[in-house]
């Protein structure tokens, strides 16, 4: 701990000095403290007439160092009105069927509770006094009731009581006993005993009533039957649910008796059920589980009683990420990523699918990941989070194929800034000539006649995607004079099932070749200094960064963030271990030591000569910091230049606290900058020797 403290203290003057220089020399470019000025839209909900959009306006509180948000309303003219007062966190807004009330979740009382606002009078009230946070709010069709999900505490496991403790004695805290399969989770820490269940409450207030029971989790989207007598939801209630996790079914629960009716039965996940407005059908997502690295989540429709199941998107080789019924019940609006872009399409029950929106996203402000929200009015107006490479998510609407952006939440923060230009590239992989998509971000003052350092930034997942979306981290790197390359190597989503599954039981592998081919393509353009190549990535990107330095010495320095270094130890320490061993390997670690180690970066640490820094949150339960420590100590034993940056109290999602996101980027740039200078020095010395 003393060493870590000294390292942090030593870094502080360097970081401050670097920031001061940036402020003086590039006052019109993005700086790390600008993170606290950013906002983005989420949780959009449009009125039935299509004239008002309610959304959460997320911002960074510089005093509490947290991302918070409150609810706003914007009309089709772009006129903004606050709905909640902004003194606390408000989220998950959902309009009542008659459009007169807005239900949402608020921390006004100190803990998340259900609130309702009467829109005409402006009055609002806290409707629940729960001991645990509610989620997945859903109005009954007549607006008289609300359904939601909440955690229900189980009985603590205390099998032993120590005898002989005298009154007033101060003994050690009692031991805890764990017997659950899932006992900790990233971002939540060690879990109390209990499960999630569904509740129903009157919209006029009163005590919520628990509908589901049993030692099973009931969460995700909740839909009502048209008569208001049943809840339609998904859950994994199979006997082996803790080990075979991707086997949820769609159920119907009678809200008066609690009686359950199972509506699906195949092996694989069936989830996110939505009852059609006419009450006759249920649309839902799912796939046949084959224990592969990736399967497309597809759109299905069945009758309200579970009969006549049919697949509507057999011809779409993409994962459906969200869905909404058309108000006439004749089709479903679907959201999916395609070639790194978020899209919304209309899928009729009979007929040809039509793409309506191609720029949905912008919620992942740290790195350029996918994701986004949309909603549809009765007249077909689509409200959605609008994505641009130069801005986090705004609210936009699409009316008859024409998109209009209604908000400009970051013009005050970014309008006067010069950001890095984002340019799409395609290239061939050296492994098999496969087409790979990527994006280049240039420094704001880029001059193609000069030479620049290059950062290869690798996405996590590994089954996810980057795209032409705003990224604070990458823009900060560009603002400091680096060209940044980010790509979607094989294994990424939005290119189809075959592309994603090329890394099934084969990760890392040729995805490394895809990345190196991208670097080669940029070197050929002539503006990259081949002596100033740098590489970094987080999570799955951390795996590939560690793999990269074990297979090449072409990079001047590397930063491995929150990695898996040893698949054997990872599977036996990560929070979601029944999934990782089952879907990423075909055997348990002790049944295939050779296979696990062949794919582990630790096996190639003896090849590493690249100065390599490790960076991980100390409370990361997804890729535990013990993985980082293994690589750090191995590098130390081999006397490779290294440093270990530990982010206190941070989970796998380091960006959740804005200052931690700042710290991550500043430490990466600190590490690269010193080896950039070293590279320049060595180059100058070499040129001097040649001249002699």
Image (cartoon, rainbow, N blue to C red):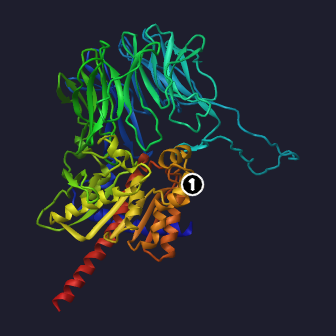
Q: Residue at x 23, y 84 (%)?
A: 686
- What residue occupies the far left of the structure in this picture? 449
The residue closer to the viewer here, 342 or 657, is 342
Q: Residue at x 21, y 70 (%)?
A: 529
Q: Position of residue 216 (x, y in %)?
A: 60, 29
The residue closer to the viewer here, 497 or 261, is 497
Location of residue 256 (image quadrant): top right
* Quarter of the image where the N terminus is located: bottom right
Horizontal side, residue 605 vs residue 261: left or right: left
Q: Is residue 559 above or below residue 363?
A: below
Q: Is residue 180 above or below residue 5?
A: above
The residue closer to the viewer here, 367 or 542, is 542
**SS label for mark 1:** helix
Q: Is residue 447 visible?
A: yes
Q: Position of residue 190 (x, y in %)?
A: 60, 44
Q: Residue at x 59, y 16 (%)?
A: 207
Q: Position of residue 172 (x, y in %)?
A: 76, 51
Q: Is residue 9 visible?
A: no
Horizontal side, residue 601 vs residue 372: left or right: right
Q: Residue at x 31, y 30 (%)?
A: 335
Q: Is residue 42 above or below residue 456?
A: above
Find disc 1 in the rendering and name its residue: 589
Q: Position of residue 116 (x, y in %)?
A: 45, 19
């Amino acid at each position: 701990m003393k060493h870590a403290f000294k390292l942090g203290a030593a870094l502080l003057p360097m970081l401050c000095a670097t920031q001061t220089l940036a402020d003086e020399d590039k006052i019109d470019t993005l700086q790390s403290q600008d993170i606290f000025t950013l906002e983005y839209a989420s949780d959009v909900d449009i009125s039935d007439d299509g004239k008002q959009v309610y959304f959460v306006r997320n911002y960074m509180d510089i005093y509490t160092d947290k991302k918070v948000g409150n609810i706003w309303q914007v009309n089709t003219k772009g006129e903004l009105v606050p709905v909640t007062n902004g003194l606390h966190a408000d989220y998950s807004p959902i309009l009542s069927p008659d459009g007169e009330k807005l239900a949402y979740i608020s921390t006004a009382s100190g803990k998340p509770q259900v609130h309702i606002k009467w829109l005409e009078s402006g009055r609002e009230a806290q409707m629940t006094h729960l001991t645990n946070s509610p989620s997945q709010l859903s109005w009954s069709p007549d607006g008289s009731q609300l359904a939601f999900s909440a955690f229900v505490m189980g009985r603590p496991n205390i099998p032993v009581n120590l005898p002989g403790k005298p009154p007033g004695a101060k003994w050690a805290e009692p031991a805890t006993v764990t017997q659950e399969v899932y006992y900790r989770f990233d971002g939540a820490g060690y879990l109390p005993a209990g499960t999630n269940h569904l509740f129903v409450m009157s919209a006029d207030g009163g005590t919520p009533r628990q509908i589901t029971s049993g030692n099973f989790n009931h969460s995700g989207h909740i839909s009502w039957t048209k008569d208001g007598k049943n809840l339609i939801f998904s859950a994994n209630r199979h006997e082996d649910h803790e080990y075979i996790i991707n086997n949820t079914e769609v159920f119907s629960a009678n809200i008066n008796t609690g009686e359950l009716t199972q509506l699906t039965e195949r092996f694989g996940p069936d989830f996110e059920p939505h009852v059609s407005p006419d009450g006759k059908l249920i649309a839902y997502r799912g796939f046949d589980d084959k224990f592969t690295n990736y399967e497309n989540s597809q759109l299905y429709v069945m009758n309200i009683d579970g009969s006549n199941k049919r697949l509507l998107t057999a011809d779409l080789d993409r994962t459906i990420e969200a869905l909404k019924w058309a108000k006439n019940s004749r089709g479903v609006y679907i959201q999916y990523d395609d070639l790194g872009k978020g899209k919304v399409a209309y899928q009729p029950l009979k007929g040809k699918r039509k793409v309506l929106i191609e720029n949905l996203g912008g919620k992942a402000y740290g790195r350029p990941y996918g994701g986004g929200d949309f909603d549809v009015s009765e007249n077909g107006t689509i409200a959605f989070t609008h994505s641009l490479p130069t801005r986090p998510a705004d609210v936009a609407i699409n009316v008859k194929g024409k998109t209009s952006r209604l908000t400009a939440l970051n013009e005050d923060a970014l309008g006067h800034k010069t950001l890095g230009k984002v340019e799409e590239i395609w290239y061939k992989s050296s492994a098999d000539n496969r087409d790979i998509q990527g994006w280049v971000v240039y420094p704001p003052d880029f001059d193609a006649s000069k030479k620049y350092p290059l950062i290869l930034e690798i996405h996590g997942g590994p089954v996810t995607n980057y795209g032409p979306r705003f990224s604070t981290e990458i823009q900060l790197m560009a603002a400091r004079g680096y060209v940044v390359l980010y790509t979607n190597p094989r294994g990424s989503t939005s290119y189809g099932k075959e592309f994603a599954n090329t890394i099934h039981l084969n990760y890392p592998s040729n995805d490394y070749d895809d990345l190196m081919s991208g670097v080669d393509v940029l070197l050929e353009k002539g503006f990259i200094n081949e002596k100033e190549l740098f590489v970094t990535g987080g999570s799955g990107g951390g795996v590939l960064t560690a793999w990269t330095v074990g297979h090449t010495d072409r990079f001047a320095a590397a930063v491995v963030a929150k990695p898996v270094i040893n698949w054997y130890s990872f599977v036996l320490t990560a929070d979601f271990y029944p999934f990782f061993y089952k879907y990423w390997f075909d055997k348990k670690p002790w049944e295939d030591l050779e296979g696990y180690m062949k794919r582990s970066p630790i096996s190639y640490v003896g090849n590493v000569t690249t100065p390599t820094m490790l960076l991980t949150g100390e409370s990361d339960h997804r890729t535990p910091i013990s993985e980082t420590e293994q690589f750090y100590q191995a590098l130390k034993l081999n006397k490779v230049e290294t440093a270990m940056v530990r982010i206190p109290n941070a989970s796998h999602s380091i960006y959740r606290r804005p200052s931690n996101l700042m710290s991550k980027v500043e430490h990466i740039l600190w590490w690269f900058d010193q080896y950039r200078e070293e590279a320049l020095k060595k180059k100058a010395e070499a040129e001097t020797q040649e001249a002699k």
